[in-house]
Image (tube, helix red, strand yellow):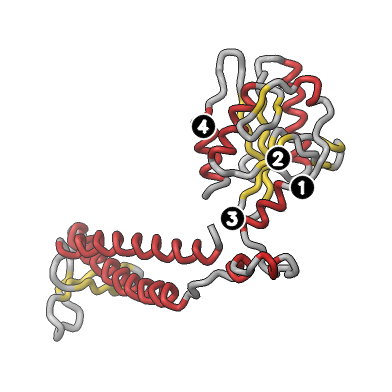
Amino acid sequence: MKKLEKIKQTCIEMLDELDDLQKKIEKSLRRAPEGTLNLSTSNGSSQYYHKTQKHEKKGKYIEKGNFKLIKALAQKDYDLRMLKEIEIHKKHLQKIRMYLPEKCLDEIYSSLPLARKQFVKPYVVPDDEYVKEWLEVEYEGNSYLTKFAVHMTERGEQVRSKSEKIIADKLYAMGIPYRYEYPLYINGFGTIYPDFTILKVSTREEFYFEHFGMMDDPEYSRKAIMKLQTYARNHIYPGNQLLMSFETSKTPLDILYIEKMLNEFILD
């Protein structure tokens, strides 16, 4: 989603949240007692008064044990302050929506005729152009792959395992740009080949997706842990820039978990 569209959508969502909150508070106020709460301090002790008439200076003293009335009046005062502030927030958000430009800056380049576009270097590259260039980057994958690649993905590439094919096809179906076995140099280790390098289009950040498919194999698990430690030493952490899935002979790949993870971290 383009940044301008995201701002507009955020404004709409915030206005909806404020409307819901306003209704909740108004419902609370309909149950509130008449009058207001006055508070004073005497000898370091708080005293509470119930004021029901404008001409009253303090109001009627509330006995210390009457916490129900004190709580109801304190809540009423808080609710009224919240309503006042909600109206201010809504007013400003509505103004933001009103004055936001209709056209995003990247649309200027997109709208150019091809005959003109080919001679222009855009200052703001549209998402579709950026993704296209990102996907067209040429690279040499893991040479180890050629010996074992036996599964063909929906995108027409070979991968090493059935699980990797499932993940690749899920990325493709969700419209998430990815590179398979794209080389990544990390300090203290050298070049590694993450299973998938994923582009988060909204922020143009690159994420790495590793599938560990033989976790009941002790030697495989040891190497997996070493790989994760290497990522961490290079400030690439799980749930931040690194996504992971796991599998054993008795616990197969959970594609629903992967889909949920991709929606949360990549398509948010």
Please give the residue where the numbered disc 4 appears in the rendered image.
257
Please give the residue where the numbered disc 3 appears in the rendered image.
202
Q: In the rendering, which numbered label is found on residue 179?
A: 2
Residue at left offset 67%, top offset 44%: 207
Closer to the observer: label 1 or label 2?
1
Local crowd size for mark 2, using a 10 Å CA cut-off: few (<14), some (14–19), many (≥20): many
Residue at left offset 12%, top offset 80%: 53
Q: Marks 4 and 3, Cα distance to the nearest angstrom?
A: 22 Å
Closer to the observer: label 3 or label 1?
1
SS for tag 3? loop
- In the image: residue 265, left or right of residue 74: right
Sequence-wise first label, 1 or 4: 1
Type of residue at label 1? Val
Q: In the rendering, which numbered label is found on residue 137?
A: 1
249 over 99 or under it: above or below: above
Sequence-wise first label, 3 or 2: 2
Closer to the observer: label 1 or label 4?
1
Residue at left offset 54%, top offset 41%: 174
Task: Give yes or no for contact between labels 1 and 2 (Cβ–Cβ under 8 Å).
Answer: yes
Q: Marks 3 and 2, Cα distance to the nearest angstrom?
A: 17 Å
Local crowd size for mark 1, using a 10 Å CA cut-off: few (<14), some (14–19), many (≥20): few
